[in-house]
Image: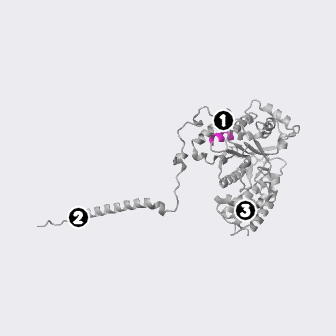
């Protein structure tokens, strides 16, 4: 007699079906994981922090030396070797390091006395942030005194010294005063012309190195400068800072500088006249490695530059009317490509600005936007009006990438959408 057939109970059948469904789901997930890179066109980028070259290897480096200090009170020795060793162990960061720039700027820690000062500082910071984003630069904004005695214009030196140590991956530290405005957002520093130098500052060789009996403390401007991350720069900062308020000879240096620079308006040492003094009294050591830039507005005095904005805007508009590629809409990330396309149209003017090329940096020297105590020669609200115009002149170059424009440089809140193919 054949055995009687048996059938699974309802509960067993349901359990079996569940296992079949679960097994099928797992198989489907495995297949999707195998073929997802093909099906999904968006690539996956692994963070550098999880890659071997992006990690901080356990090998000892200068950061592990308890004697190393970020302060200007103690010199750093063998910095070139220490930095080179660090880069060797961080190959991902070493790639491209020769052209890497860190922009450094800052302001005071306390609120501004000027009722609109904090607003102006915010907009001045935005301007620098915009420029750095468009050119791929990192930006460090500091609002703390890193040395208790080094305040006012001397406060930049401790910050720069600390930034050099904190960023061995950068070749250049670019100090930009808070009252300086980038007014050509396309222009990129011509680093190739500075390859034999360690310091770049706007100035005039004849005013710095000649006329020894008639020196001017305005022979250069120390509010914007580019300094190489190297031992030479470390040494310069040490010597430069030794003339400042942390020095026991501070007042003595004031008398020396005021005797040297007949037009110096105040008795105590300042960073600018101190730098000029170092350059011309020890030219082989400091002057020969300093590039005094005067061929373009590495920084320019605002009084003359703000008058150019209208004519320059008109010139760029005419340029784009006759060159359709220059007015083509594009992503902000590819702005450098279009800046290069524009260059042949402005290169006949050289680096100098005028009716053709925008001034690179407009420096509002003497305006004091935070405390409001501007030079008495500047009448009424002239400083604040012209700072607003400069910021909107620069902002128009940014907003253009987003399809808008300030039609009136004196009305920051007003923007207008741009029609397609503007300004055809």
Residue receiving disc 2? 9
**Which badge, 3 or 2, comes first in the chain's sequence?**
2
Residue 275 at x, y percent in the picture: 78, 39
Residue 381 visible somewhere in the drawing: no
- In the rendered image of this protein, does residue 403 appear above or below residue 184? below
Residue beneath the point at 85% across and 41% down? 216
Residue 146 lies, with reference to residue 416, above or below; the image says above
Q: Is residue 165 magenta-colored? A: yes
Residue at (54, 37) in percent of width and height: 59
> SS of the residue at dot 1?
loop
Q: Mark 1 points at which residue?
A: 71
Which residue does the numbered mark 3 point to in the structure image? 406
Q: Where does the image place residue 198, in percent across and percent down from the top left?
A: 72, 42
Q: How crowded is mark 3: few (under 14 residues within 10 Å), some or many (20 or more)?
A: many
Between disc 2 and disc 1, whose residue precedes?
2
331 over 179 or under it: above or below: below
Provide the residue span drawn in magenta. 159-167
The image quadrant where one finds the N terminus is bottom left
Badge 2 crowding class, 10 Å Cα cut-off, few under 14, some 14 to 19, many 20 or more, is few
């Amino acid at each position: 007699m054949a055995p009687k057939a048996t059938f699974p109970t309802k509960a067993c059948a349901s359990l079996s079906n569940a296992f079949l469904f679960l097994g099928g789901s797992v198989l489907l997930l495995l297949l999707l994981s195998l073929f997802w890179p093909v099906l999904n066109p968006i690539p996956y980028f692994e963070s550098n922090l999880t890659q071997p070259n992006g990690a901080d290897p356990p090998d000892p480096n200068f950061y592990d030396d308890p004697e190393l200090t970020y302060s200007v009170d103690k010199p750093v020795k063998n910095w070139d070797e220490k930095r080179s060793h660090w880069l060797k162990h961080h190959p991902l960061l070493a790639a491209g390091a020769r052209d890497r720039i860190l922009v450094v700027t800052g302001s005071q820690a306390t609120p501004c006395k000027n009722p609109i000062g904090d607003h102006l500082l915010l907009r001045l910071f935005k301007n620098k942030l915009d420029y750095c984003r468009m050119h791929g630069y990192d930006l460090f904004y500091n609002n703390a005194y890193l040395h208790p005695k080094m305040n006012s214009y001397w406060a930049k030196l401790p910050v720069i010294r600390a930034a050099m140590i904190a960023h061995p991956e950068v070749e250049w530290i670019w100090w930009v005063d808070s009252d300086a405005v980038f007014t050509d957002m396309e222009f990129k520093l011509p680093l190739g012309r500075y390859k034999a130098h360690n310091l770049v500052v706007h100035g005039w060789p004849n005013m710095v190195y000649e006329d020894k009996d008639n020196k001017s403390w305005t022979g250069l401007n120390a509010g914007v400068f580019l300094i190489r991350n190297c031992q030479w720069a470390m040494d310069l900062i040490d010597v430069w800072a030794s003339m400042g308020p942390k020095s026991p000879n501070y007042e003595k240096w004031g008398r020396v500088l005021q005797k040297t620079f007949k037009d110096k308006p105040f008795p105590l040492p300042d960073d600018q006249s101190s730098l000029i003094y170092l350059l011309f009294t020890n030219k082989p050591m400091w002057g020969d490695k300093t590039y005094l830039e005067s061929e373009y507005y590495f920084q320019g005095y605002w009084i003359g530059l703000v008058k150019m904005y209208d004519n320059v805007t008109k010139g760029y508009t005419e340029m784009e009317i006759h060159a359709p590629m220059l007015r083509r809409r594009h992503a902000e990330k590819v702005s450098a490509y279009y800046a290069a396309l524009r260059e042949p149209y402005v290169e006949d003017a050289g680096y100098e600005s005028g009716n053709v090329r925008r001034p690179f940096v407009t420096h509002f020297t003497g305006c004091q936007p935070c405390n409001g105590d501007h030079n008495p020669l500047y009448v009424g609200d002239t400083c604040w009006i012209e700072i607003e115009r400069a910021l909107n002149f620069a902002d128009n170059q940014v907003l253009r990438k987003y399809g808008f424009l300030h039609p009136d440089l004196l009305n920051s809140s007003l923007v207008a959408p741009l029609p397609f193919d503007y300004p055809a």
